[in-house]
Image: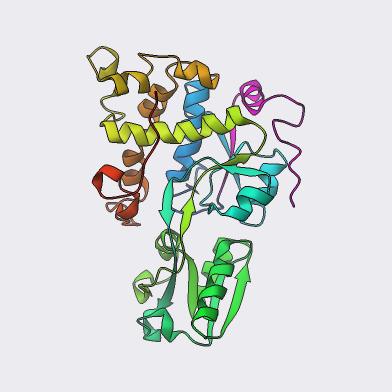
Amino acid sequence: MLASNAMAGSHGDSTLAQVKAKGFVQCGVSQGLPGFSNADDSGNWTGLDVDLCRAVAAAVFGDASKVKYSPLSAKQRFTALSSGEVDILSRNTTWTMTRDTQLGLNFAGVNYYDGQGMMVPTALGATSALELDGANICTNTGTTTELNITDYFRANNMSFNLVAFEKADEVVAAYDAGRCDVYTTDRSGLAAQRGKLTNPDAHVVLPEIISKEPLGPVVRQGDDQWFNIVRWSLNAMINAEEMGITSANVNATQYNKVTPGVARLVGKEGNFGEELGLSNDWAYNIIKQVGNYGESYEKHVGENTPLKLARGVNALWTKGGIMYAPPIR
């Protein structure tokens, strides 16, 4: 079991108090997963997971730029959070019962519903994962993908040889070099990493989805206030999309007549910000500076991006998906 004595903070202060004192949110992200958390040549981080970090900063400081990023491998991520090295882990991390109950951590929600898939070279000629008996399979260590792929091959009475690496780019490089017949990870990860291959068009993602991978932000147990801030920052983005409030029109909510639900969301009614220990315009600042969930999705991973990921189950519940946030009231 990982140490969780950081809890509210190594010096007894709440995480919110520590974050305010240092002036920024320290966010644990991936070591480079386009669309989710990825840095450009100038060190500017962008992505769906990065937007969650920025949303929390906007809620706390009224300034989405007040974030520092810690690139973490799958193996490093939980220790970094438990030890207090980071305030939030927003790094394509699957919510599981083991992680919820044994690691001293809390998942604050789901910002991408995913499932594990498999990619193979087109030249292999495979059209189904059921044709992969005896395959060499590349993946990351310290992830649910190792367990899922083992379960899948055992359930289908197939053998395989697992070739695992700590860093995602090591996995991609090994697969690209032909050391493996198969690359397996979340399907969003396959879409993101495919662009790093020498010839992306020479590879195909097989149709099977072998697991449920609800990905979301994680915090340490023992600090309900910080947990609520992270959870409701995500919920505010989802509720804003449902209400049709965007970064472009949120200003108008301040002087136009709006529905009671919108009034509560943007801080015109109630004391919802104060109940989080924040100013009452916390959600307004998120929407204005980061956007609603749909804006963030389409900007970073949607069908007009290199990842070309359809909303699918990540669409709002009102549009055929399962993305749903509790009401602010």
- In the shown orientation, is residue 8 left or right of residue 247? right
Task: Residue 153: give x, y in percent of width and height.
Answer: 52, 79
The quadrant holding residue 139 is bottom right
| Numbered range of the magenta stretch | 1-29
Task: Residue 103: give x, y in percent of width and height.
Answer: 68, 49
Q: Quadrant of the C terminus?
A: top left
List the single residue furthest toward the top: 255
Q: Is residue 47 visible?
A: no
Say which of 109 and 329 sits in front.
Answer: 329
The quadrant holding residue 150 is bottom right
Point 31% across, 23% down: residue: 261
Asked if residue 234 lies in the magenta stretch, the reply is no
Number of callouts: 0
Task: Residue 42: give x, y in percent of width and height.
Answer: 50, 43
Asked if residue 15 lies in the magenta stretch, the reply is yes
The quadrant holding residue 223 is top right
Q: Is residue 17 visible?
A: yes
Rendered view: 299 above or below 61: below
Point 63% across, 55% down: residue: 98
Point 72% across, 30% down: residue: 9
Point 47% across, 26% down: residue: 58
Say which of 179 and 16 sits in front.
Answer: 16
Rendered view: 140 above or below 150: above
Task: Residue 121: give x, y in percent of width and height.
Answer: 41, 79
- In the shown orientation, is residue 202 left or right of residue 106? left
Rendered view: 186 above or below 161: above
Say which of 26 and 242 sits in front.
Answer: 242
